[in-house]
Amino acid sequence: MRRKGIGDAKGGAGWLTTFNDLVTLLMVFFVLLFTMSSIDTKALKQFQVSLMKGLGVLNKGEGSPIGVIESFSNKGMEKGSIRGQITMEGSESIADYMKDLESLKGVDVRFREKDLIISLDGSALFKSGMDKLDPEAFPVLKKLFKIINVASCPVRVEGHTDNVPIFTEKFESNWELSTGRAVNVVKHFIDEGNVAPQRLSAVGYGESKPLVPNDTPEHRARNRRVEIVLEKSEEG
């Protein structure tokens, strides 16, 4: 006569206890992996809910799909439109503030990895060979205040020149001119835009990082610029 096994004693479902323990351990293992990683807490919670739903821990309809939206992501953006789907976490869409900038002459916006770079024509900010901001540039810079204050990332101001040498009583090289311009833009952001100083940095690159070859007057004009870099790539 055949002896009764554990499965027979419980209607053939005794193996479910071991299976449920295994599933629970797997769930805990994956949650720990994600907890130790640098993933966003909100995304982790979404993952946990979705995983529990897939394992049948939640009732149907109680789970939510994983969806992580990164600030300044250029994925899914319409070609030729910088506004696209740029959003800021827990804030208004930064795209609303970009509309005015796009229409201004001498303003170019582009991405470098996750960083958002707003490039301003140097001639619109400074007179030739000077590092003092032209008052006519204040309206343009004022439009940047809102964008910078909405963003929660570090901001680097870069000064760039063309390759035409400069030697004046104040500036012995393009390095000093570009640095002076970057510093004065930073000061303006602090004094007039109420931007926190600890978020700002200034650097001068002189002629070392041209956008285009310095082979025509038009190209040299493009290389004379100040770039406002919103440093999303540096965030954890």
Image (spheres, grey):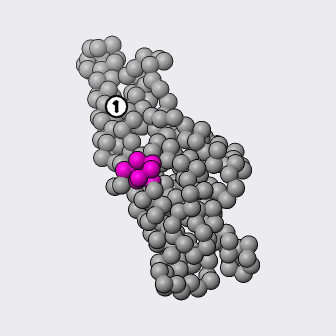
Q: Main secondary structure of the magenta part?
A: helix
Q: Position of residue 43 (x, y in %)?
A: 42, 37
Query: In the figure, is residue 225 to the left or right of 2?
Result: right
Per the rendered image, the range of residues in magenta is 189-196
Front-lying residue, 38 or 50: 38
Amino acid type, residue under disc 1 in the picture:
Val
Q: Residue at x 44, y 29 (%)?
A: 50
Q: Residue at x 49, y 54 (%)?
A: 230
Rendered-image quadrant of the N terminus: top left
Front-lying residue, 85 or 96: 96
Q: Where 31 falls versus 159 (above or below)?
A: above
Q: Where 89 falls versus 170 (above or below)?
A: above
Q: Position of residue 89 (x, y in %)?
A: 46, 38
Label 1 environment density (alpha carbons within 10 Å; few <14, some 14–19, many ≥20): few
Q: Where 213 falls versus 200 (above or below)?
A: below
Q: Position of residue 173 (x, y in %)?
A: 51, 83
Numbered-mark total: 1
Query: In the figure, is residue 193 to the left or right of 129?
Result: left
Quadrant position of residue 55: top left
**Secondary structure of residue under mark 1:** helix
Magenta segment: does it hold 26?
Answer: no
Quick check: can you spot residue 233?
Answer: no
What residue sits right under mark 1 in the picture? 23
Q: Where 133 falls versus 214 (above or below)?
A: above
Quick check: can you spot residue 81?
Answer: yes
Q: Position of residue 135 (x, y in %)?
A: 56, 57
Q: Residue at x 47, y 80 (%)?
A: 170
Front-lying residue, 94 or 101: 101
